[in-house]
Amino acid sequence: MTQQAVLIAQISDLHIKAGGKLSYRQVDTLGALRKAISRLNSLSPRPDAVVITGDLVDFGNQEEYQTLQVALGALEIPYWLMVGNHDDRQAVRKVFAGQTELFQHHEFIQWEAECGPLRLLALDSTVPGEPQGELCAGRLNWLEEKLEEQPSRATLVMLHHPPFISGIEHMDRQRLQNPQQLATVLEKHSQVERVLCGHLHRSMHVAFAGTVACSAPGVSHQVALDLRPDGPAHFCLEPAGFLLHRWTPEQGVITHQCVIEQSDGPYPFYDENGLID
């Protein structure tokens, strides 16, 4: 890590299956993750850490988490895990017993971490057995206490469920159900430079609680962009991607959206005669 810039890669919604099964009988999510890992490992400079913002696997069973653990063994960058509505807290803790962040809170998978000058606070927004998210008083109190501890330190707050309306109706029914309570906490703490989430399988950015909230694209499949009020719950195989958050003390956080598949190039704009004609 450089003295100034901090790079955090965010991948989300892996939906890993075991035994070579395809997600929704269509998507090779394990193959997609392997491509994402190869892309992350190839970045220069490399990210200082990777945050995986939930829906690690598809049905929350140990075999899926074991498959994920093997795949993540190829990632040459430190990573932190978060849970989403497809995950099971106990199963992920059992398989990833070496991931100490999973055990910071006795009940929820909520954790704090440091990456150079940057602080990360992860929230557990899951409601067991339900697709939507919620933050109970205990989880919000934890967040408030953590923010009060270091009021001048640049901080990323992360959760799986988006606290905003995307316009994709079937996903908005599954969003965080009490976003205003989260906003009430965040509005008191100006050190929060981003609210990062997953769940939507699309990259979105919106003003929220005095900061910016953004969601990551899916590592494999994307939720179809359908803004009709009666739009069906569909996915598509648009290019998969991830977010790369770059923090500096002078500017704060800038977020880049990165495509996983390698494309042609790069090509130069200029030659020895100037701008290429």
Image: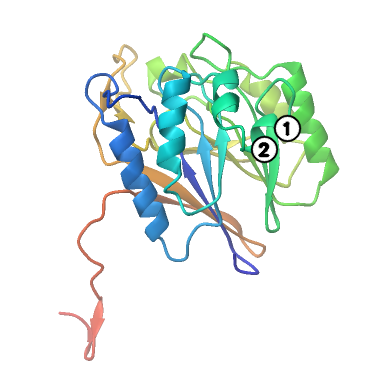
Secondary-structure class at tag 2: helix
Q: Is residue 119 above or below residue 215?
A: below
Quadrant of res 122:
top right
Q: Position of residue 179 (x, y in %)?
A: 62, 22
> Is residue 16 something that shows in the picture?
yes
Q: Position of residue 3 (x, y in %)?
A: 65, 69
Residue visible at 22% across and 66% down in the picture: 265
Q: Position of residue 134 (x, y in %)?
A: 62, 17
Q: Left or right: 175 with respect to 140?
A: left
For marks 1 and 2, give the CA distance.
7 Å
Mark 1 neighbour class, 10 Å CA radius: few under 14, some 14 to 19, many 20 or more:
few
Residue under label 1, please give it: 104
Residue visible at 52% across and 24% down in the picture: 84
Q: Pick the residue in front: 211 or 79.
A: 79
Q: Left or right: 3 with respect to 64?
A: right
Three-letter residue code for mark 2: Thr
> Which quadrant is the C terminus positioned in?
bottom left
Q: Position of residue 62 (x, y in %)?
A: 48, 21
Residue 100 tag number: 2
